[in-house]
Amino acid sequence: MPTSPRQRLLRLAHITDVHVQPERGAAEGFAACLRHIQSLPDPPTLILNGGDAVMDVSAADAARAAALGDLWRSVLRAECSLPIEHCLGNHDFWGTHPKSTGLTGREPLWGKAWALDLFGLDRRYRAFDRAGWRFILLDSTFHLASCKVHGYTAKLDDEQFAWLESTLAATPAGMPIVVLSHIPIITVTAYFDGDNESTGDWAVPGAWMHIDARRIKDLFRKHPNVKLCLSGHIHLADRVDYEGVTYLCNGAVCGSWWKGPYQGCPAGYGLIDLYADGGFEHRYVDYGWTARET
């Protein structure tokens, strides 16, 4: 008996870690990526932005932050005709780096407010439904004064975790779920981003991968309709299949911060097909960017 073709419900592109800046041709590179996505023979109808849209405002002054935000908006206006949904990246939070100077913390757009303004959002985590799938967008960055190097660790605060619990519980069992976070919940890439075995034991920084991954994966185990988790942050690409959930870290649009490939991973984006049976197909797409000298 011939079988009926698998029903694709949605094709999406997952871009992450654009790190747009005036230097190194980054705006041209971001535009090239958007044009590549939209000119595919079978183009996606949705873009997910995984955060770190701008090079860095965590230690920027007001003028640099404004310039980076304006550049991001201008490229999107000129080059993107598709709907785009955003989640927050650690480099999108203004003035939060321990080395930040000259800011009081009382500026109206200080911290995560800057990212919410950039992306036109009214909350830092949220959910929406599209084509029979539920999308859950998380805020991975938990700021701690004790984190002297980065100023943050990767985890969900208790309020957000409670919201995630209730959102998963309220999702119909037959509705498949995609989770988008900037920082990976589970990834292999974190082991090789730095000399993390130099002490003789593996030591993955809490800013590289969710320090509460055990708590989150235990929650996912109760909800088998959680199918796919997407992330960026590390600028490397991998796939981890664990306890029925696939975790995809989708490299970086900027590669090695617009200096070429990062540890052999080219500048690129994820292309993902979502199906009616709760399955998906994925590939990482090299859009052909060549590093510039200036």
Image (spheres, grey):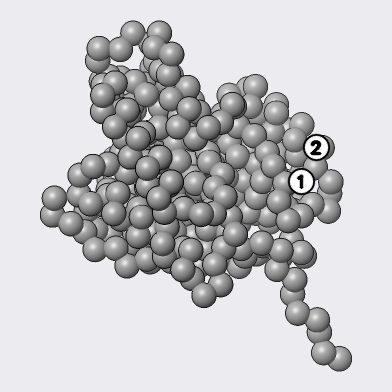
Residue beneath disc 1: 223
Q: Is residue 25 left or right of residue 187?
A: left
Rendering coords of residue 96 (x, y %): 36, 21
Q: Which three-letter amino acid code belongs to the residue tagged 1?
A: His
Q: Is residue 203 visible?
A: no
* Residue 221 placement (x, y as % from top left): 72, 46
- Location of residue 171 in the rendering, given as x and y in whole percent from the top left corner: 80, 42
Q: Earlier in the sequence, mark 2 or mark 1?
A: 2
Q: What label does residue 169 carry, if any?
A: 2
Q: Secondary structure at mark 2?
A: helix
Query: Is 89 in front, or is 129?
Result: 129
User: Does the residue at mark 2 contact the one at mark 1 (Cβ under 8 Å)?
Assistant: yes
The image quadrant of residue 168 is: top right
Q: Residue at x 43, y 46 (%)?
A: 77
Left or right: where does residue 63 sit relative to residue 82?
left
Residue at the location (56% across, 31% down)? Answer: 121
Query: What residue lies at 32% left-to-right and 44% top-to-bottom?
Result: 20
Element class at badge 1: loop
Q: Residues within 10 Å of mark 1 (few under 14, many from 20)?
A: some
In the picture as drawn, the residue positioned furthest to the left comes out as 293
In the depicted structure, whether residue 110 falls above or below residue 20: above
